Amino acid sequence: MTTLAIIGGTGLTQLSDLTLIKREQLDTPYGSPSAEFVTGELNGIPVIFLARHGNPHRLAPHQINYRANIWGLKQLGVKQIISVAAVGGITSDMAPAHIAIPDQIIDYSYGRLHTFFDDEAVQHIDFTYPYSQKLRSRLISAAAKANIKISPLGTYGCTQGPRLETAAEIQRMERDGCDLVGMTGMPEAALAKELDMDYAAISVVANWAAGKTEGEITMEDIERHLHKGMANTAELLKAFVS
């Protein structure tokens, strides 16, 4: 049984090194997932891949059916999830094309369906450590094995999107302790925790956050940095599963 899943975000709608075994659509009690679930092998290890924004990329962060995505993976027997997502860099060590393995989250999103327990008795998960330390340690070791420089710690701030942030918002987030800013880290991490699934993230810095450089953020710059960052991420994933 395939127990590992990779959820790909902006810049990673498919895994080029994944040997395809099958594709399948699933219906869930929470609606339709973002895309079909792709089962394959990466370095000979069974893996399920899901494109978070759909394939092709069509879903804005607030439109993603996070509950259907996580429930579908659980239904397929997944026990461990690696999330890959593009982020903005806030602190000085989070430069474009860099990779971080965050250890904390601050959630600034709103209005998202963020729990499986809406229609049941309230259940309070412990979310002190939102990411699986076991998976984080394996990712950090894999980066060293692949000779890829990463940041082994970092606080991810999840904003609503799809617009990018203002300079003042980034200043506030930095005061709050955020190193990275993204739009999809929540409620994905909490939903995985509710279903007792190990979850860790690879954050690929696509750009400096608003106000960290002069001028506006351009899609050309983001795409250039993502190309390099995602190439390193692919090598990191191969080292992780080997």
Image (cartoon, rainbow, N blue to C red):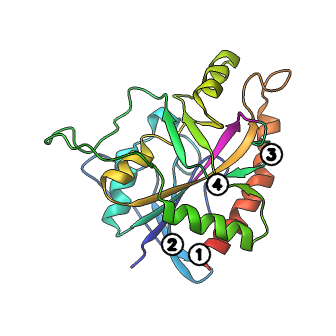
Question: What amino acid is at disc 1?
Answer: Val
Extent of the magenta region: 84-91
Q: Earlier in the sequence, mark 2 or mark 4?
A: 4
Within-10-Å neighbours for mark 3: few <14, some 14–19, many 20+: many
Most extreme residue toward the top is 168
Circle 3 — which element?
helix
Secondary element under disc 4, as helix, strand or loop, is loop
Residue 225: assigned label? 3
Q: Of the residues tagged 3 and 4, which is closer to the observer?
A: 3
Assess whether mark 3 and mark 1 are in contact (beta carbons under 8 angstroms): no
Q: Residue furthest bottom?
A: 44
Q: Is residue 125 left or right of residue 204?
A: left
Residue, disc 4: 12
- Image height of 30 relative to 165, above or below: below
Instruction: Report the front residue among 63 and 181.
Output: 181
The reply to whether the C-beta atoms of the residues labelled 2 and 1 are less than 8 Å apart is yes
* Amino acid on which disc 4 is placed: Leu
- Which disc, if any, is residue 47? 2
Three-letter code, disc 3 = His
Residue depicted at x 73% and y 69%:
144
| First along the sequence among labels 3 and 4 | 4
- Can residue 46 be seen here? yes
Q: Quadrant of residue 43?
A: bottom right
Distance (Cα) linking label 4 and label 1: 17 Å
Query: Disc 3 or 2, which lies upstream in sequence?
Result: 2
Q: Residue 241 shows which numbered tag?
A: 1
Mark pair 1, 3: CA separation? 25 Å
Q: Secondary structure at mark 1?
A: helix
Q: Residue at x 42, y 26 (%)?
A: 110
Do residues under tags 3 and 2 come within 8 Å of each other at their CB atoms? Answer: no
Query: Which tag, 2 or 1, sits closer to the chain's start?
Result: 2
At x 55%, y 49%, the residue is 103
